[in-house]
Image (cartoon, grey):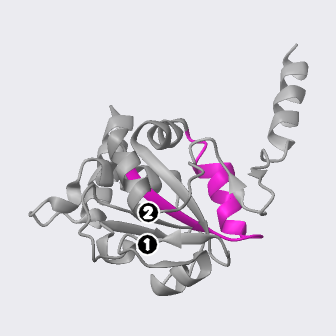
Amino acid sequence: MTRLLTLIAAALVALPAVAATLGDDGLHKADWMHDTFKDLREDLDEANAEGKRLALIFEQTGCSYCKKMHEEVFPDPRIDAMLHEDYFVVQLNLHGDIEVTDLDGEVLSEKQAARKWGMLFTPTMIFLPEEVPEDVSAAQAAVAAMPGAFSASTTYDLLMWVKEKRYEDTSEEDFQRYHARMIEERAAAKGD
């Protein structure tokens, strides 16, 4: 019996990671993403109506870091739950041609928006506040951005930091200090 359990455990470890679902556009898809007309003012209003925070995620075809996030980080139960319950996520293609209406009213393609907002890496997540003045772009309004692939703990902490509006905190605890404190608290909890 022990030998059978050992063989089963070895087989499970040898299995490849579950492949993330790819859409017709070659981008990774998740059920917490919202397929919208990419009018960001409308998306912001819809997110607010649902009691969620608007987040934009830039990805590109063939992005190995996007794949890593979709296979290893986003499936984390804490992260998956928060993305479903607390965030209204709209996906944008770094090289895409789909029309986007920025929060300032400018209409441009996804790739033009990426250039306008200074997007250099994929995946990049941009987190927006609930209220944005009419003449402000998404990049100008962003309360936080996560350029690249990060661990589940960093991603979770950033999602929580934005959700709790800790960017409004006037103390010295910016995200890096908050994240360091969370790491220490998790380590202390494991030691109990």
Element at label 2: helix
Could you tell me the amino acid type at mark 1? Asp
30 or 97: nearer the viewer: 97
Q: Quadrant of residue 132?
A: bottom left
Residue denoted by label 1: 102
Residue denoted by label 2: 40
Could you tell me the amino acid type at mark 2? Leu
Extent of the magenta region: 53-76
Element at label 1: loop
CB atoms of marks 2 and 1 within 8 Å: yes
CA gap between label 2 and label 1 equals: 6 Å
Compare marks 2 and 1 and give the one earlier in the sequence: 2
Is 111 situated left or right of 27 in this image? left
Residue 23, given in percent of the width and then of the height, sits at: 77, 55
Q: Quadrant of the image for the C terminus?
A: top left
Compared to residue 29, the image places residue 50 above or below, namely above
